[in-house]
């Protein structure tokens, strides 16, 4: 089973990844003492997803337990949290002290989760689609035409950025399904995996096979390629604008 570590990176300039004093600084690979979890951010709070411990924690206190293999979390409008439990192929929401399990029959092999304009969007490798659900877990739509859809993230304007990994690109969609421009064809990656979008519209895409994080500007142009000594499998951006890279 993968051993997860964390790299904490900061933003510099036009979305470039950097540590130390300048945008060209090397990225270190020393882990921080955060166990095997992956950091997710919602409503100004940091949550640690702990797949092997089958739980989600906040500040060391469990928020959700008895999960199977939680891999993604996103904030819900008005408060609350949506969690993707890959092991059981379900969504779990917690809001106002109430926990609900959703989409028990709708997902085959879910990979990642995003929330935009009150809807939940899940990449599903089983049928190479993005499944669109409402807050009650009802399927509203399925977006097709992907090959190995993996990471998905919502931008500040609500646009969904979806990794079409098999085709080596990122596709963009409005929450209503209208497709926008694709980007990333110029990147030298193979099978990118996590993606995150910051408040300024910069996209960060991790590629485990290349051991690098790729940075795209709001205009979708590639602005930086940050090599790592580890394989990035998860990305999260805090409200303070720090990029957190979960790696193996």
Image (cartoon, rainbow, N blue to C red):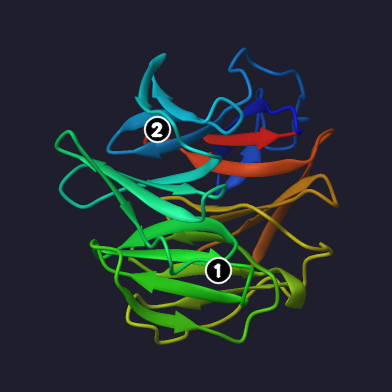
Question: From the viewer's perspective, is residue 180 above or below residue 65?
Answer: below
Q: Residue at x 57, y 47 (%)?
A: 87
Q: Can residue 201 be spotted in the picture? A: no
Query: N-terminal of the two: label 2 or label 1?
Result: 1
Quarter holding residue 173 = bottom left
Residue 4 point in image, percent of width and height: 69, 28
Q: How many marks?
A: 2
Q: Can residue 16 be spotted in the picture? A: yes
Label 1: how many Cα within 10 Å (few below 14, some 14–19, many 20+): many
In the displayed image of the protein, which residue is found farthest to the front? Answer: 105
Q: Nearer the viewer, mark 2 or mark 1?
A: 1
Residue 225 point in image, percent of width and height: 75, 51
In front here: 79 or 127? 127
> Circle 2 — which element?
loop
> Circle 1 — which element?
strand
In front here: 20 or 176? 176
Q: Residue at x 40, y 53 (%)?
A: 91
Residue on which the image places disc 1: 162
Q: Is residue 191 left or right of residue 218?
A: right
Residue on which the image places disc 2: 240
Residue 179 point in image, percent of width and height: 46, 86
In front here: 67 or 26? 67
Quarter holding residue 7 = top right
Q: Is residue 30 left or right of residue 201?
A: right
Where is the C terminus found, in terms of image quarters? top right
Question: From the viewer's perspective, is residue 209 above or below residue 119?
Answer: above
Q: Residue at x 33, y 65 (%)?
A: 157
Q: Residue at x 72, y 42 (%)?
A: 232
């Amino acid at each position: 089973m993968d051993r997860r570590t964390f790299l904490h990176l900061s933003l510099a300039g036009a979305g470039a990844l950097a540590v130390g004093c300048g945008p060209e600084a090397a990225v270190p690979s020393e882990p921080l003492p955060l166990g095997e979890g992956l950091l997710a951010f919602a409503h100004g709070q940091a949550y640690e997803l702990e797949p092997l411990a089958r739980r989600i924690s906040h500040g060391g206190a469990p928020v959700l337990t008895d999960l199977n293999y939680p891999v993604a979390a996103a904030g819900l409008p008005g408060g609350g949290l949506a969690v993707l439990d890959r092991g059981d192929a379900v969504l779990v929401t917690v809001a106002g002290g109430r926990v609900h399990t959703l989409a028990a029959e709708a997902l085959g092999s879910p990979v990642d989760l995003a929330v935009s304009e009150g809807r939940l969007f899940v990449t599903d490798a089983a049928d190479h689609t993005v499944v669109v659900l409402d807050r009650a877990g009802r399927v509203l739509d399925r977006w097709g035409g992907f090959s190995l859809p993996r990471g998905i993230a919502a931008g500040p304007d609500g646009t969904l950025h979806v990794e079409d990994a098999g085709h080596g690109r990122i596709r963009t969609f409005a929450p209503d399904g209208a497709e926008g421009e694709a980007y990333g064809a110029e990147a030298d990656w193979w099978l990118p995996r996590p993606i995150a979008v910051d408040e300024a519209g910069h996209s960060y895409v991790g590629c485990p096979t290349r051991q690098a994080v790729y940075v795209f500007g709001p205009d979708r142009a590639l602005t930086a390629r940050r090599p790592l000594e580890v394989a990035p499998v998860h990305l999260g951006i805090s409200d303070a604008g720090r990029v957190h890279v979960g790696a193996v």
